[in-house]
Amino acid sequence: MTTDEPGVDVWQRFPTRQVAVGFGVALVLLVGLLVAVDWRAVGVELSGADPVVAVLAPAVILVAFACYSEAQRRLLWSAGVELPRRGMWLRYMAAAGTRMVVPMGQAAGPAILAYAVRSAADDGTEQAFAATTVGGLASHAAQLSLASVGLVLVAQRGGGRLAWLVGIAVAVLATTLVSLALLVQFRRGALRRLAGLVALAGQATVGRVSGRAHAALSPGAVTSRIDRFAGAIDAIADRPRTVATAFALHATGWTLAAGALSAALLALGRPDLVALAPLLVPTAGLIAMLPLPGGLGGVEVALTALLVEVGDIAAAVAAAAVLLYRLAAYWFVVAVGATALGVLAIGWAAERDGD
């Protein structure tokens, strides 16, 4: 086990208090949703679901995450980080499970994944973070493409208030992504100055109580990290075909993930709404950027509202379909991610004992 490899300290750094608060807020939203749509009616709908069709949802989710993992593996390879498909999948699922239970985990997804794969990077965390940042941009770009179509659909169906809310979310995320991409690719001087200011603030705060943090936040160390990060970004940019493939894989993954909602609607006997899922899931997924664990609670409320507005179905049916979908897209992923993290932890412990 290298000094840069994650280990048991992962558990020591876990933000238990923030997670508890996040799940508390999510629970309030979920309870509010069930009360608003009549939880008894939702229970009746769920009891009548076809279990054989419903189990297709987690299967489709696994294929979707295999697409995400492969996209990230190819980007990492472009940055000089080589991982076998199985090793990449384990790390990707472990990171996915983690970001789904940590508030703001979706926004911090590239950093969480970079931490999981950094042991394979010759240049350390910066090399891995560059690849995962590009992967995050490709994923959000694919999501925005589908969400924009969903926005048009909502507007055409007369969902004025929903269309405005979705439109604002699309605009904010698109502006953020474009600004970040321009900053990283073309404004390296501004990026260094920004990093320098953050480093000075860190030295004046955290650096006062930690000598290690003070050294890591020195201007020279920060500049060196920024240069390594920028070098890895340039290496990826030199392979536009790989970036395009990553975008295509993420778009496929988003479409497959939406297939889990299609399976839920089929299980509830609503095949007429299956085609809406690939547009509504990425649209409601914008809510996952809120400070909730994996968007829990917020995504359920938003997706139920979208289904009722666009699909013109009873709220209880919409809520039942969304709960079945989230059982696969959220809770199943968390369970698989925890299992993957356990497998990785056993391997890390074995390497440490071998050393």
Image (cartoon, rainbow, N blue to C red):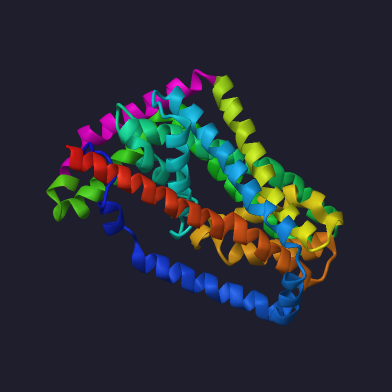
Exactly how many numbered labels are in the figure?
0
Question: 239 or 85: which is nearer to us?
Answer: 85
Q: Residue at x 56, y 21 (%)?
A: 240
Q: Quadrant of residue 131?
A: top left
Residue 215 lies within the magenta run: yes
* The N terminus sits in image quarter: top left
Instruction: Decide if residue 114 is on the left or right side of residue 152.
Output: left
Across and down, in percent, residue 71 comes to 54, 32
Prevailing SS of the magenta stretch: helix
Across and down, in percent, residue 323 comes to 66, 65
Instruction: Decide if residue 331 is on the left or right side of residue 14.
Output: right
* The C terminus sits in image quarter: top left
Q: Quadrant of residue 31?
A: bottom right
Question: 34 or 286: which is nearer to us?
Answer: 34
Using the rendered image of the protein, determine whether residue 136 is visible from the camera's viewpoint: yes
Instruction: Decide if residue 67 is on the left or right side of residue 198.
Output: right
Q: Residue at x 26, y 58 (%)?
A: 12
Q: Residue at x 46, y 67 (%)?
A: 22
Residue range (magenta): 214-239
Across and down, in percent, residue 299 comes to 62, 61
Across and down, in percent, residue 200 comes to 24, 45
Q: Quadrant of residue 224?
A: top left
Question: 236 or 344: which is nearer to us?
Answer: 344
Q: Vertical placement of 1 versus 211: above or below?
A: above
Q: Vertical placement of 64 versus 74: above or below?
A: below
